[in-house]
Image: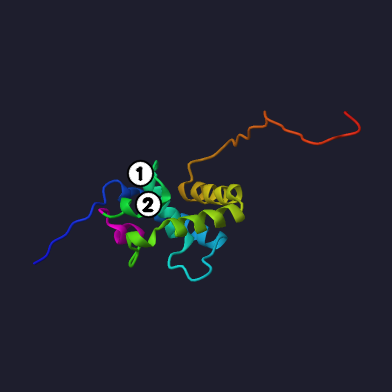
Amino acid sequence: MSVSSAIVAHHGIVAGIFDDLEIGRIIDEEIPKQGQHKLPHSVVLKSMVLNSLGFNERRLYIFPKFFNNIATERLLGPGVLPEDLNDDVLGRTLDRIYEADSTELFLKIALQVMQHLQFGTQLLHADTTSVSVHGNYEHID
């Protein structure tokens, strides 16, 4: 009889909230998987969120090692292995986030979370204290 164990710890709570808030659905709608890679961008981004809870100051090529002792399939989905989360996959996802406009993606995720949690937003603050204008203008006014 062979027995093995893997850690879920606090990552299970974070992965569960990620799923309950349907953050992955928003990501998949905005940046759908293209090409031959195995994982959708939502799973890769979810792995980055989990990774940021304790392994974030490491190089991307070491990223899969974070998931060696963690229940990867339980947290990210059936068939997802640590070696699937390599630096090439992470780089492609980061590139797609940039191409899709990261600010717009963040806004859509934030709105989804606000609708799902319904914590009663009465006031939305936008920082308008910083204004930058660049260029060579004939009329200063």
Label 2 belongs to which residue? 63
Q: On the rendered structure, is 20 left or right of 32?
A: left
Q: Quarter holding the N terminus? A: bottom left
Q: Residue 36's x, y, as percent?
A: 48, 71
Q: Say if 14 sits above or below 74 in the image.
A: above
Residue 100 visible in the picture: no
Query: Looking at the image, which residue is at 67% across and 32% down?
Result: 128
Q: Residue furthest left?
A: 1
As for residue 72 lying within the magenta part, the answer is yes
In the displayed structure, 36 sits above or below 52; it is below
Kind of residue indicated by mark 1 = Phe
* Cβ atoms under marks 2 and 1 closer than 8 Å: yes
Query: Is residue 29 shown left or right of residue 134?
Result: left
Which quadrant would the C terminus be assigned to in this image?
A: top right
Q: Main secondary structure of the magenta part?
A: helix
Mark 2, residues whose alpha carbon is within 10 Å: few (<14), some, or many (≥20)?
many
Nearest to N terminus: mark 2 or mark 1: 1
Q: In whole angstroms, how far apart are the C-alphas of marks 2 and 1?
A: 8 Å
- Which residue corresponds to the image point at 51% horizontal and 40% vertical from the top-left? 120
Identify the residue at image location x=58%, y=49%. Answer: 102
Mark yes or no: residue 45 visible.
yes
Query: What numbered label is drawn on residue 55?
Result: 1
Identify the secondary structure beneath mark 2: helix
On the rendered structure, is 71 left or right of 47?
A: left
Specify the quadrant of the image occupied by residue 137: top right
Which span is picked out in magenta? 69-76
The disc labelled 2 sits on which kind of residue? Phe
Helix, strand or loop at disc 1? loop
| x then y, percent, for residue 82 | 33, 59
19 and 101: which is toward the camera: 101
